[in-house]
Amino acid sequence: MLVIDAHLDLSWSALNWNRDLTQDVDSIRGLEAGMEQRGRGANTVSLPAMREGEVAICLATLLARANPKGKSPLLDFRNQTIASAMARGQLAYYRLLEQQGHLRRLDDWRSMRMHFGKWQSSARSEAPLGYILSMEGADPIQSPDDLQNWWNDGLRTLGLAHYGPSTYAHGTASTGGLTQQGVELVRSMDELGMVLDATHLAEESFWQALELFRGSVIASHNNCRQLVPGDRQFSDEQVRALIERDAVIGAAFDNWMLYPGWEAGRTSNSVVSLENVIDHIDHVCQLAGNTRHAAIGSDLDGGFGREQSPGDLNTIADLQKIPPLLKKRGYADSDVEAIMHGNWLRVFREAWG
């Protein structure tokens, strides 16, 4: 079944982890064998694996934080200028993959509809992988006036913050609302027709952004706090607010978001399975009373590998295990199709219509 995955850090993985994503997963693992960094030799994502898993479209991110006190050399940069330059490099990577025929950027509903239609036909083997350009944390945008430049370069979805405070909002593991620049950025997003990604927003920022923003909202990769406590997950109140905005929430596959008390480097991935992902999808569906708002946003290889992914997932191709698990829970074929791709198609049709 065709898949739309709403969150893959492809360029970040390629450039910051020095991975050739045009190779198969086993080849990348072999090149990283013996590396000590957590996640090395355990990646799950490559372009061939995406094709094997029928991931016809993904939201592909740009990710660079302006955080002078940050301790992650792969994420944190001294100022916005450096963060912007890093994100520009990630954008260049996607453009090169497009030139080589691996990817196709989707900027509007016409291009998305035509691309998905080709993947539904017998010509899918000739079709590149489709991607919608997204930014996880808005620090690379130098000012609200700079947003137009990013729009011209293809940026279509934007999350205001990642972890901690950003230039524009407060993110996971921090508290606070939007900055004045954040308020201005949200207004600029509205004017351009950009989609707001509510993922990672601290609660005050979340509620303020939803109140100010009038356009289409998504949560590309977010799970449910009712099942796994913590501010990285959404409360039921937040999920209901997104449902009221007709948003779609992509379930993430990161084990610490799937299993209460998970500890990186200590808890075995054998205690987590794709059934845990289904639990979060099902919780969103139960709150909504339908399947209109649940989807996939795997975040696979977002700084972790198999060691922090469900134990029964080897590569992203195993997204194909999700449909039978949903059917086992009683979901009809039409509902499964909505969760695997139909809901993302709808939300972008509405955003770009």
Image: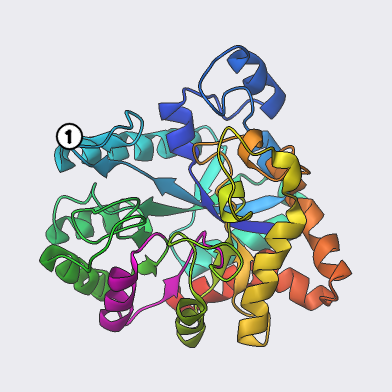
Pick out the residue farthest to the top.
34
| 203 in the magenta segment | yes
- Please name the residue shown 50% across and 39% down the image: 10
Residue under label 1, please give it. 78
Residue 180, image quadrant? bottom left
Three-letter residue code for mark 1: Arg
Q: Counting other residues with Cα less than 10 Å from the Cα at mark 1, is it few (<14), some (14-19), or many (20 or more)?
A: few
Residue 88's x, y, as percent?
Answer: 29, 39
Residue 235 visible in image: yes
- Please name the residue shown 32% across and 58% down the image: 171
Q: Does dot 1 land on a helix, a strand or a loop? A: loop
Q: Is residue 295 left or right of residue 121?
A: left
Residue closest to the eye, 321 or 277: 277
Residue 139's x, y, as percent?
Answer: 23, 49
Residue 172's x, y, as percent?
Answer: 36, 56
Q: Is residue 12 left or right of residue 71?
A: right
Residue 2 visible in image: no
Q: Is residue 153 above or below residue 305?
A: below
| 58 in the magenta segment | no
The region drawn magenta spans 200-224
How many labels were placed on the picture? 1
- Please name the residue shown 35% across and 63% down the image: 201
